[in-house]
Amino acid sequence: MASTPEWTHSLPTALFDGLLPKLAIVLELTQKAEGTATPVAKQALLHATNDFKYALAQAKDYASTLAGGDLLVEEQDSVVAMLEMLKQHKQQQLMQFASEVGSLSTIAIPNVSSKMEIDSTASTPFASGAQF
């Protein structure tokens, strides 16, 4: 088997969804009246069992390579709780920032433009050779 799984970018849900039907086929074959008495029944059971074992091995291999899969359930719960608290804190910061920005835009500064004087010399470039 390859050292790196071929499903590196997305979760192969079909792989996991296919496990239960494959197991059901194995169980149906073992519960049939003929069981494993005939060579055809034995071959069908062998094929179904190998198919299930291969799919299960792939699913285990994929599950073991998931990021964070090495954490215990309690540790995963702790990380999730920390991320939820961080999310709430960021939302509070964003709401506070939005309210401050909103309050700045509603502050009325009476006739700012009439109180400002324009200094035309401040924006005029110096003539060549003129220095202070």
Image: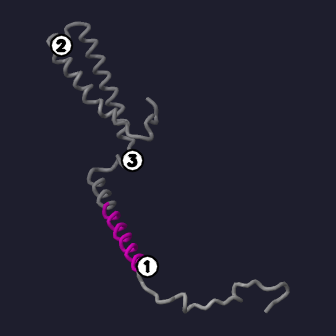
Closer to the chain start, of discs 2 and 1, is: 2
Number of other residues with Cα within 10 Å of mark 2, as a class: few under 14, some 14 to 19, many 20 or more: few
Dominant secondary structure (helix, strand or loop) of the stretch shown in magenta? helix
Q: Amino acid at mark 1?
A: Ser
Disc 2 versus disc 1: nearer the observer: 1
Disc 3 versus disc 1: nearer the observer: 1
Vertical order, 82 against 15 (above or below): below
Secondary structure beneath disc 3? loop
Residue 67: mark: 3
Nearer to us in this view, 100 or 73: 100
Q: What's the distance in space between the residues labelled 3 and 2, CA to CA?
A: 42 Å
The quarter of the displayed image where residue 33 is located? top left
Quadrant in which the C terminus appears = bottom right
Magenta stretch, residue numbers: 84-105
Secondary structure beneath disc 2? loop
Q: What's the distance in space between the residues labelled 2 and 1, CA to CA?
A: 80 Å
Name the residue at 55% across, 90% down: 114
User: Left or right: 59 with respect to 31?
Assistant: right
The quarter of the displayed image where residue 30 is located? top left
The question of residue 40 being in magenta is answered with no
Closer to the chain start, of discs 3 and 2, is: 2
The x and y percentages for residue 51 are 32, 22
Secondary structure beneath disc 1? helix
Residue on which the image places disc 2? 35
Number of other residues with Cα within 10 Å of mark 3, as a class: few under 14, some 14 to 19, many 20 or more: few
Residue on which the image places disc 1? 105
The x and y percentages for residue 38 are 22, 7
Q: Amino acid at mark 3?
A: Ala
